[in-house]
Amino acid sequence: MSREARRLSRDLPSGIVLLGPPGAGKGTQAALLAARLGLKHISTGEILREEVQQGTELGKKARAYMDRGELVPDELMIEMLDSRLDGRFLLDGFPRTTNQAEALERIAKVERVLSIRLSEEETVRRLTARRVCADCGRNYNLVSNPPRVPGVCDACGGRLIQRDDDTPEVIRRRYRVYEAQTAPLREFYRQRGLLVEVEGGRAIEEVFQEALRLLEEGR
Ligand code: AMP
């Protein structure tokens, strides 16, 4: 069925949106929540990194913005998402601007929005210790969530690397971009009665349990 026909029949993809500054644990919580709630995990940052690695047209356009810690232009992001959104989703990293949030309302039904809070200092501390599996994308933290064998992914045996944008200077830029452009979406979704919030500076399991409770409440 075409997107337009689905829009008319109201049979739109539906799901949950995660908001939060870099390092708040969106990727980690998204993977846990998607598995528990049976949702398709869509990480726009992850998709972009794959596009960059494969050297696609989109990857070439996106790379410079990502390396600087800035947002990739809305038109590119909205088009990219529209072609991948389907069924029941959990969105991690989208929307990041009001423009993207308005576009999302036209192509999907957002059922709940979970915002994970984290301070700038904690963001920098966490992300400088972050390592990511080059093969499966799983995240680790050398301090709070280290792999069993240094440098090797527990899940798939892949090599752990540091993301190009996880340098202190770029991390601070990404935090400010979040505050300026994405944090206003909390108010956007609060007004629609969709927002729930958790404090992200705690153990993964604690955040996960509270997130589950909040997402399941009032459904
Ligand atoms: P993330 O993995 O979510 O931290 O995203 C890494 C980078 O990808 C961001 O710093 C942006 O440059 C870009 N990016 C990811 N999602 C979006 C989005 N929805 N809008 C614009 N840029 C994005």
Image: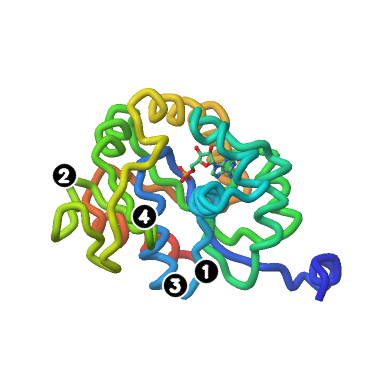
What is the x, y in percent for residue 193? 58, 51
Q: CA distance from mark 3 to mark 4?
A: 26 Å
Q: CA distance from mark 1 to mark 3?
A: 9 Å
Return the residue at label 4: 134
Q: CA distance from mark 4 to mark 1?
A: 21 Å
Residue at x 39%, y 63% (from the top left corner): 31
Q: Which mark, by number, is residue 37?
A: 3
Q: CA distance from mark 2 to mark 4?
A: 19 Å
Residue at x 27%, y 35% (from the top left corner): 128
Residue 173 visible in rendering: yes
Q: Assess disc 2: are there few (<14), some (14-19) or many (≥20) residues with their C-alpha within 10 Å of its C-alpha.
A: few
Mark 4 vs mark 1: in front: 4
Residue 113 visible in rendering: no
Relative to 128, say whether 138 is above or below.
below
Nearest the camera: 156 or 12?
156
Relative to 168, say whether 183 is above or below.
below
Nearest the camera: 104 or 169?
169
* Residue type pointed to by label 3: Leu
- The mark nearer the N terminus, 3 or 4, is 3
Image quadrant where residue 123 sits: top left
Return the residue at label 1: 40
- The mark nearer the N terminus, 1 or 2, is 1
- The mark nearer the N terminus, 3 or 2, is 3
* Residue type pointed to by label 4: Ala
Q: Which mark, by number, is residue 143?
A: 2
- Left or right relative to 89: residue 84: right
Q: Determine contact: label 3, label 4, CB under 8 Å.
A: no
What is the x, y in percent for residue 115? 45, 46
Relative to 87, say whether 92 is above or below.
above
Q: Assess disc 4: are there few (<14), some (14-19) or many (≥20) residues with their C-alpha within 10 Å of its C-alpha.
A: some
Residue at disc 1, secondary structure: strand
* Residue type pointed to by label 2: Val
